[in-house]
Each structure stands twice: as C-alpha cells, then as structure tokens.
Amino acid sequence: MTSNPSKLPEYRKPPVAEVALSVQFQPIPGFGFPHMGLLWAEFKKELPVVQQHPPLPRTVEDFGVPVGPRITLEAGMMQGFPSPRVWFLDKAGAELVQVQNDRLVVNWRKVDDGLQYPRYNTVRARFDEAIAKFRRFLRDHDFPDMAPDQCEVTYVNHCLAGEVWSDLGEIDRVVSMWRGLDGFLPNPEEVQFAARYQITDDQEILGRLHVTVEPARRISDHRPLLVMQLVARGAPVGDGLEGVGRFLDVGHEWIVRGFTSITTPEMHAEWERLE
Amino acid sequence: MTNGAPYPTGPHGLPDDPEISDETALWRRVFPGWWITDENQGRVRPTSKAFQNYPDKPCLSILIGEMVTARGDEPSTALEGFDGYALAAITAGLARTHNQGVVHDPNDEDAAHGLVYGHKTDSIRSRLAKGSVWVIPPP
Amino acid sequence: MTLGSISSGLDDPTMRHTYAVKNAYVWGYPHQGRRSYPSTLTGYRLFTVPGYDFEFKMEPMIDLQPSWLDSVISSAARLLALEPNWDSYGAPPIDPDRLFYGLNLLTSLLPSGTPAPAVVPTNSGGVQFEWHTQGIDLELEVIAVGKVNLFYENELTGETSERELAFDLSDLSPAISHLGPQAL
C-alpha cells in the first residue's frame, strides 16, 4: 500500500488502451463544416490527418429521475443535417482531437504495443492546449465563447489473459466484485456487467462513474481480454474552464481509485502497482 | 418601429400604443400542432407555446383584427398560404393585464401587423392561452 | 470513444452513454448472436407510426407498454417531420436530442395509467409536454438536454410553481404524481 494515503494508486504497467478527456458545451450557433476546416489550421502541424464522423449525441448526467426504459430512433429521416464531427489525428493515430459544434475531446490511444501510456498529466496538458486553441479560434472568428455544461473522463483498459487468468469465465480473478457460486453452475463461458456510482464530494453529488466490463478477443492472436471502461461524467465544478478542469481531475481520481477497487490484488501485481 | 419613429412607451416601460384600445382583438396564427384539449376548460384551445416570444426578440407577432376587417378583408385572409392553421384572438387588455405592451408594426407582409412586447413567463403564456378565443377554429 | 481495431463485438462505446444502466439485466451486443429476445416481456419493441417513416425502439420492455405510449410516439413522429418555419414565424426544426431526452424522462417518470400528455413543439426547436386535467395545469418544457422548465398550477389547492430544473430533476416526480388515476 502507498505510504501517502492521499496519493493516487499508480501502476508501472497500467493496462490503459485509451484515454479521452471531453467537454460538452452549449451548441455554438453557425459553427459547422467550413469552420472545422479553418480550425484544422491551428492543429495541422501536430495533427495532420483529418477524418469525419457522425456527431456524438448530447449527454448529461441528471439526478432525481429513476432509471426507466429508453426510447431511441431506430430509423427515419429528419429535417436538417446533423452537426458534423471531425477528428484531427497524428500520423500514428495515437493522439487525436475531436471537434463538433458542442463538444471537444482529446484522446490518447494505444495503437501499438510499444506505446506507453503517457499519464494523465500529459493528456490533460494536451487537452488544455486544445481548448486554448479552440477558444482563440472562436474569438478570432466572432463566435461566442464556449459555455461548458458537461465534462467527461474516459479510461478504457484492456486486461489481456496471461499469468493470472486464461479464459473469459475466470472473471473473479480480475474483478474483485465477482464472487464464486455455490458449486452447481460451472464457470461461466463469459461475463459482462455494468455498474454506476454517484461521484460525491462531502455529500454533494458531482456526477457519475460508469463502469462496464465486457469480454473480447484480440484480432491479431484471438487472445481473450476483458475490456474495462470507466467513464466519469458530470457538470463543471464551478465556473468557466477552471470548473471543467476541476471536474476532470475529480473524475480522474475516481476512475483510478475505482479501477483499483474493482480489480484484484493479483492483477495489481501483474500491472506492477507502485508501493 | 413605425415609419422609423420609436414606439410609444406604456406604463410598464414597454413599447405600448394607447391608441390601441384594450378591447382590440389581436389575432395569432396557430399551427396545427399547437392546439390542445383542456379538460379543465372543457374545450380545445391554443397551447401556451402559441404565445411565446421570438427566440431572439422580446415580442411576438400578431395582426390587429380591426385593421384587417376595416380594409374589407375577412379573417380567413390571415390564413392564406397556411392550410390547416387556426386563428386565435386575445384582447389588448388581456395582454396589458399581464405586463405586456401592444404596438402597431406594419411590415411587408401585412399593414395590420403588430407586436406584443414583454417578457412572457410560463404563467403569463398560460393566461394568454386560456383567455384566447377562436376567430377561425381548428379544422 | 474511438476504438475499432479490437474485435470485441462492441458498438461505438459512446453510443452507450445515452443508455441507462439496466440494473440486474446484462445485455449483449448486436453481433455474434448475443442478442435474442424470444420472451414478450423482455428485450425491445419497435414502434412505427402510419404515414411516417420513423421507427422507434423502446428497451428494455420488461413490462407491458405504458398506456400513454402510442399517443406520445405518434406525436414524436409528427414533431420530427416538421420543416423549418413550421409555425409561420420562422421556427427551426425540432432538435431530436431534446425530443428524445424528453421522451425518456416520461418513460422514467410516468406510470402507466397516467393521462397521455399533449406533445407540442416550441419555436426554439424544443418540445413541451402538457396536461390540463383534474384541475391541474402541468407543463414540462425541455429547454436543453438536462434542463427542464416546470410549470404547475392546481386550481383546487391554489398551488402554483414555475421553475427551471437543471440536472437535478427531483422535483419532477412529485409534480407528475398529482396526475393519474390516483389523483383526487
């Protein structure tokens, strides 16, 4: 265990496959495709590759409403075009910035085994830089400033089968919340689950932590793996971009501590948890 | 503004023309998805949303009914090109009772065009909707 | 949010952000035969509206569908089909994000047996659900995803309330509880 209890758990070989820091804001009227092209000029030197994707839906964490069935649109054409989303990527595809007229996301992806997770502070610094460029662009082109309403930290972890576990039914060796059964049912073929927790600070609800664990197989060698995704989402903690930063830091802490809570000491040892 | 001159101002500090009497009927086009059954009133009436300001201006558009009829036009002319719409009316007095002002604002569309100025809370819009009558009811 | 190089059978994970966690239910994914709903009280149901090419999906259907659902789905289809300037005063088309956010508030809050609301578009591209019955006027306007305007008047008790709720929507349930067969 760490000697300083307030220090976050740390791992020499964390199984991080992707990190995304996101801010959602009120849609910027009139900000569309042409402006994405102009904005790319601000990022082109480091992120010379561009891709287009369908927009991300607006998502908020709200409270005081019970969980119920969801209605979604399965098919149909509506009026108007959806707001576009563009990706600015580096040549390796590991670093990217995603922009749409109500969202900015900075991602890091482990696109090959040789890449090391650069740690939260580095990704956070890239996020701050991307925000600064975006706001400068808005100012220079007479758009209103961003009005953030939700922030999101996402960590996707790939736990590969290896020394501690070898088949997808052995989830109890990876996830500490899963308990063995009483002996009638055999080991499951696979397990997946989802949980959500309220993120609080001194009784005040700041947001939600969503945890999902799903089975998968790696394309290259069909090796089993468990995809553990943790998403912390909530409103900015305070005004302005400082409020965004505060939530991102809180979300990161909850993800790291939450990840440590839900995984087993055996896996911590495999990931070389630092004492 | 009328003819470039600023609107007269009423006691609420809003644009409000005292030449438009309280009894004057102010007509409002009602889109087909904007009438609802009010079981409390026992009738179909406009939703409160039919009396919402423009998103970017503190007013909504109306036609001053007596100006339309004074030039010899039927109320149905207010719905020309708007198949399936209905026409509702509130009085200028009802609007003023709820802190609104009424001005004549002739435009290219209609010389009888007017505006009802003022912030409209949910309860004000509800009162306007409940106090409205049909000039041309829903088809 | 971006992974596509792993053969995990996963959808784009971001789309799952708009789905509620299903408590004890574990849901599979549309690939590899993981999704199968032979029971009539589990899984999902699809709804179409005559005259419109929209298809709505509701899940999980662990229950009979609420009594108000057909009426609300029909209204939703009409709203999604509205063209610019539908109100003759320059209104934009209805924002699907706000509409579906509102629909999903109803599925979370409105018991079967509650009178179906009128579903009206607003001139800012939003949607309002309203009830005028049993001496009550109740209007819920979805101003933005996560932000709802609540207007409530009860002519029998004299109670009146008009407020904007953002993210903390815990006042909605008590307001809606005044409606329905249990009221009065």
Image: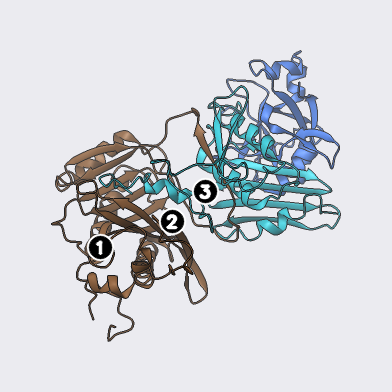
Q: CA distance from mark 3 to mark 2?
A: 11 Å
Q: Does residue C16 lie above or below A207 as drawn?
A: above
- The three-letter amino acid code for the residue at tag 3 is Val
Q: What element does badge 2 sit on?
A: strand
The first of marks 1 and 2 along the sequence is 1
In the visual, does C45 lie left or right of A115? right
- Which chain is assigned brown? A
Q: Does residue B16 lie above or below A222 as drawn?
A: above
The picture places residue A52, in percent across and down from the top left corner, at 29, 36
**Residue in the picture at 29% in, 47% down:** C3
The picture places residue C16, in percent across and down from the top left corner, at 44, 49
Q: Nearer the viewer, mark 1 or mark 2?
A: 1
For the residues beneath circles 1 and 2, the answer to whether they share a chain is yes
Circle 1: is it few (<14), some (14-19), or many (20+) Cα within 10 Å?
many
Residue in front for this viewpoint, A253 or A115: A115
- Which chain is assigned cyan? C
Q: Quadrant of residue A267?
A: bottom left
Asked if the residues shown at circle 3 and circle 1 are in contact, with their CB atoms under 8 angstroms apart, the answer is: no
- Subunit of label 3: C
- Subunit of label 1: A
- The three-letter amino acid code for the residue at tag 1 is Pro
Query: Which residue position is annotated with label 3?
Result: C145
**Residue in the picture at 54% in, 25% down:** C53
Query: Which residue position is annotated with label 1?
Result: A15
Q: Nearer the viewer, mark 3 or mark 1?
A: 1
Query: Which residue position is annotated with label 2?
Result: A150
Q: What element does badge 1 sit on?
A: loop
Q: In what quadrant of the picture does the N terminus of chain A appear? A: bottom left
- The three-letter amino acid code for the residue at tag 2 is Gln
Q: What element does badge 3 sit on?
A: loop
Q: Quadrant of residue C66?
A: top right
